[in-house]
Image: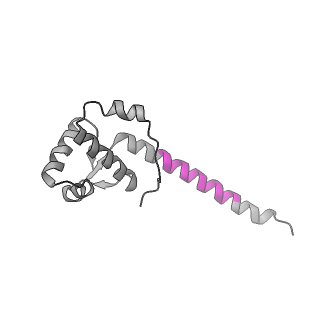
Amino acid sequence: MGTLKWYKRDPHRAVVGMTGLTLEEVGAYNLLLDWLYIRDGKLPDEPAVISQYLHTNLRRWRRLRSSLIAKKKIYVLGGFLRNERTDRELVSANTIAAKRSQAARRRWSGKGAHHQF
């Protein structure tokens, strides 16, 4: 679960980006972002699950969901809740991880052939 153990957060951009959200929306949004990173961007759009993640009831989550979608903070695609910035960060992180893994494999495969004892 979750390939990223941390993610970049620019506090100024976060505060500016959350302008216009209520305090309740800010809390829900921040928890959703964390859950998106924990779940590698695969957060099922299932009200019962999300309301548990947010420690709230179904009625409140449905209202918050509608509001966050209307304010373009989250969107739904293929049955999953998504966030544009999270999508970009996860693609970037996975690309970097793949490149590092490939470089490590090249180093290890090359070392055995060049060792002289």
Residue at the outermost front position: 23
Q: Main secondary structure of the magenta part?
A: helix
The residue sitting at 86% across, 66% down in the picture is 116
Q: Is residue 97 magenta?
A: yes
- Residue 18 x/y as whole percent: 31, 34
Residue 88: which quarter of the image? top left
Residue at the outermost bottom position: 117
Q: Is residue 81 left or right of residue 64?
A: right
Q: Which residues are magenta?
A: 92-107
Quadrant of the rendering where the N terminus is positioned: bottom left
Q: How is the image coloured?
A: one colour
- Residue 59 x/y as whole percent: 12, 51
- The residue closer to the viewer here, 13 or 101, is 13
The residue sitting at 60% across, 52% down in the picture is 100
Residue at the outermost left position: 59
- Residue 95 x/y as whole percent: 52, 48
Quadrant of the rendering where the C terminus is positioned: bottom right
Q: Is residue 105 left or right of residue 40?
A: right
**In this figure, what is the number of numbered marks?**
0
- Residue 44 x/y as whole percent: 27, 56
- The residue closer to the viewer here, 19 or 2, is 19
Q: Is residue 13 magenta?
A: no
